[in-house]
Amino acid sequence: MSSGKTSSAVETGLTHLAVSLRGVTKTYDNGVMALGPFDLAVRKGEFISLLGPSGCGKSTVLRLIAELSAPSSGIVRVARHEGEVQPGHGIGFVFQEPTLMPWTSVRENVRLPLKLASVPKAEARARADAALASVGLADFADSFPRELSGGMKMRVSLARALVTDPDILLMDEPFAALDEITRFRLNNDLLALWRTLGKTVIFVTHSVFESVYLSQRVVVMTARPGRIQADIRIETVEPRGEAFRTSAAYSDYCRKVSAALAPSYQGQSTL
Ligand SMILES: Nc1ncnc2c1ncn2[C@@H]1O[C@H](COP(=O)(O)OP(=O)(O)O)[C@@H](O)[C@H]1O
Ligand SMILES: [Mg+2]
């Protein structure tokens, strides 16, 4: 039985925080202890990365925050507006795979969350088109997923997560399967969206370089069961761009984060 708890801001008064996990553990039914104890506080509007080796519990953290899974112990709190009582409300989730419906148009894929929420069709269509425009795909609303490149499919997936205007965006290794140049472009576009939309972003990656480039804080996790190994603030001139990627400050942070991450890989083959 689960003894952990997920509760909303109405009870918890998370004034400045978007998400708070306190003493959270997760043991799956098969006995695998995936996480914890794990403590994390994310401020509203913050961009943080969770960085750690495969299997350390990163996706588990996101699923707990999205209330797709309950903690075994500890407390998960997520700030919400009054009236957002359904689990998952106020949260957008982007997975590594774009998971688009192949049989229907890009617009219909993006409209899906609004359709499920019974938003009237004309309004949903306008909002889907606006979300597509925000990710640079205004001209592709009538295309089918098979007609798009990997990067474009990921943009559709991002538009689908943004279409409900969530306060919190959870991203689970979204760009891991893309080539480097496409990934860099998406990194820049995501940062631009984050600056304009003011959402809280929790971004999972196993790339040191990506975590340092994108986030205000890099939270380094230990090997399973995932705990916090280091919590590193990345301070630089904003907005970030290619100048940051090639700067000495960027390499210094990457070295620092790599050093913090190294113990999490001890005992694991590097092959
Ligand atoms: N539904 C599940 N049932 C059993 N074990 C699971 C389940 N989901 C994940 N795990 C295990 O929990 C650990 C952490 O998984 P996960 O959070 O997916 O790690 P990460 O995202 O860091 O790769 C892994 O060892 C994984 O095999
Ligand atoms: Mg994962």
Image (cartoon, rainbow, N blue to C red):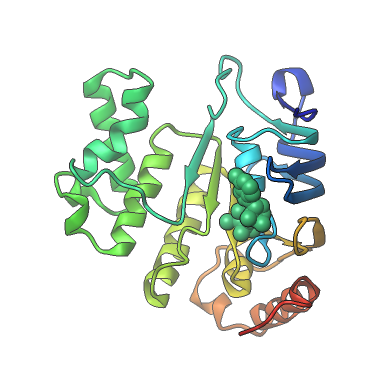
**x%, y% of residue 185?**
40, 68
**x%, y% of residue 97?**
40, 55
Residue sitting farthest toward the left: 142
**214 shown above or below 13:** below
Is residue 68 visible to the viewer in this orientation of the structure?
yes
**24 shown above or below 207:** above
Is residue 48 visible to the viewer in this orientation of the structure?
no
**x%, y% of residue 209?**
59, 74
Residue at image coords 21%, 23%: 122
Q: Is residue 239 left or right of residue 50?
A: left
Residue at image coords 39%, 69%: 178
Image quarter hosting the C terminus: bottom right
**x%, y% of residue 78?**
68, 31
Figure quadrant of residue 236:
bottom right
Q: Is residue 199 left or right of residue 44?
A: left
Residue at image coords 80%, 55%: 227
What number of labels is visible? 0
* The image quadrant in which ligand 2 is located: bottom right
Q: Is residue 34 left or right of residue 89?
A: right
Residue at image coords 58%, 17%: 85
